Image: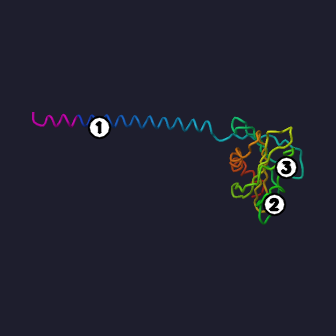
């Protein structure tokens, strides 16, 4: 029958192309599922730390009460307590928290309650629209050996916000990014805006 060989070849090509397309679609679906599973696993293992507000644990002083937050070891890799409060009109209005001397003057070392030794020089940081500085410390007193602290201060004109993080291990630089990210969270920023009267 004339043309029958051509028709058979055409049908075979259509079937082959259809099978290839079906197989390729299945491969794409499999790869998408694997990528989705991997992404979810990474998100579960390295998800955003969960911070809980807790009661301010310190006696009142000239700066009053602030906000206290806790992150469990399961979320942050170690226990972290962050204490935040405003120091209205106490910051250098001209240069802000531009150097370690100003950070030291603003820091709430009294909240750390122990002898401390700086790990090294401080670093510039940015919290929302505010510039500031952070510096890490070793807790030197033997009763708290193995712990560390991070002091962070940032300002809006003459008003400063000071955060003190008490960290359950001796490597504050490892958790500093998580602490800075938390200080940039809406919970803290909204509190800062209200407290600073913005």
Q: Nearer the viewer, mark 1 or mark 3?
A: 3
> What label sits on residue 91 in the rendered view?
2
Counting residues from the N terminus, which is met first, the one under dot 1 or under dot 2? 1
- Local crowd size for mark 3, using a 10 Å CA cut-off: few (<14), some (14–19), many (≥20): some
Does residue 6 belong to the magenta stretch? yes
| Quadrant of the rendered image containing residue 178 | top right
Does residue 16 appear to the left or right of 49 in the view shown? left
Q: Earlier in the sequence, mark 1 or mark 3?
A: 1
Q: Quadrant of the C terminus?
A: bottom right
Q: Could you give the CA–CA distance between mark 1 and mark 2, rounded to whole angstroms?
A: 72 Å
The local secondary structure at tag 1 comes to helix
Residue 26 image point, x, y percent = 40, 34
Figure quadrant of residue 166: top right
**Neighbour tally class for label 2: few under 14, some 14-19, many 20 plus, Cα within 10 Å:** many
Q: Which residue is mark 1?
A: 17
Mark 3 or mark 2, which has the lower sequence index? 2
Image quarter where the N terminus lies is top left
Q: CA distance from mark 1 to mark 3?
A: 72 Å
Mark 3 = which residue? 109
Q: Residue 182: percent from the left, percent from the top?
A: 70, 47
Q: Is residue 158 above or below residue 137?
A: below
Residue placed farthest to the left in the image? 1
Secondary structure category for the residue under label 3 = helix
Residue 146 in magenta? no
Give SS at disc 2.
loop
Q: Tell me residue 10's x, y (percent).
A: 21, 37
Q: How many marks?
A: 3
The region drawn magenta spans 1-11
Q: Residue furthest bottom?
A: 94
Tell me the CA gap for discs 3 and 2. 16 Å
């Amino acid at each position: 029958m004339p043309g029958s060989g051509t028709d058979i070849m055409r049908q075979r090509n259509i079937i082959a192309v259809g099978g290839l397309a079906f197989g390729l679609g299945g491969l794409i679906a499999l790869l998408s599922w694997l990528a989705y599973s991997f992404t979810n696993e990474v998100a579960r293992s390295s998800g955003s730390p969960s911070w809980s507000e807790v009661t301010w644990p310190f006696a009142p002083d000239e700066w009053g009460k602030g906000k206290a937050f806790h992150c469990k070891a399961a979320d942050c890799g170690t226990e972290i307590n962050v204490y935040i409060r405003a120091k209205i009109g106490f910051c250098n209005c001209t240069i802000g928290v531009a150097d370690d001397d100003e950070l030291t003057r603003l820091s709430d070392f009294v909240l750390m309650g122990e002898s401390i030794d700086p790990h090294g020089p401080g670093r510039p940081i940015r919290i929302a629209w505010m510039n500031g500085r952070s510096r890490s410390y070793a807790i030197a007193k033997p009763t708290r050996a193995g712990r560390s602290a991070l002091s962070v201060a940032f300002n809006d004109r003459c008003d400063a916000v000071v955060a003190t993080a008490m960290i359950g291990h001796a490597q504050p630089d490892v958790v500093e990014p998580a602490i800075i990210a938390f200080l940039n969270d809406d919970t803290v920023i909204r509190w800062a805006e209200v407290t600073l009267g913005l």
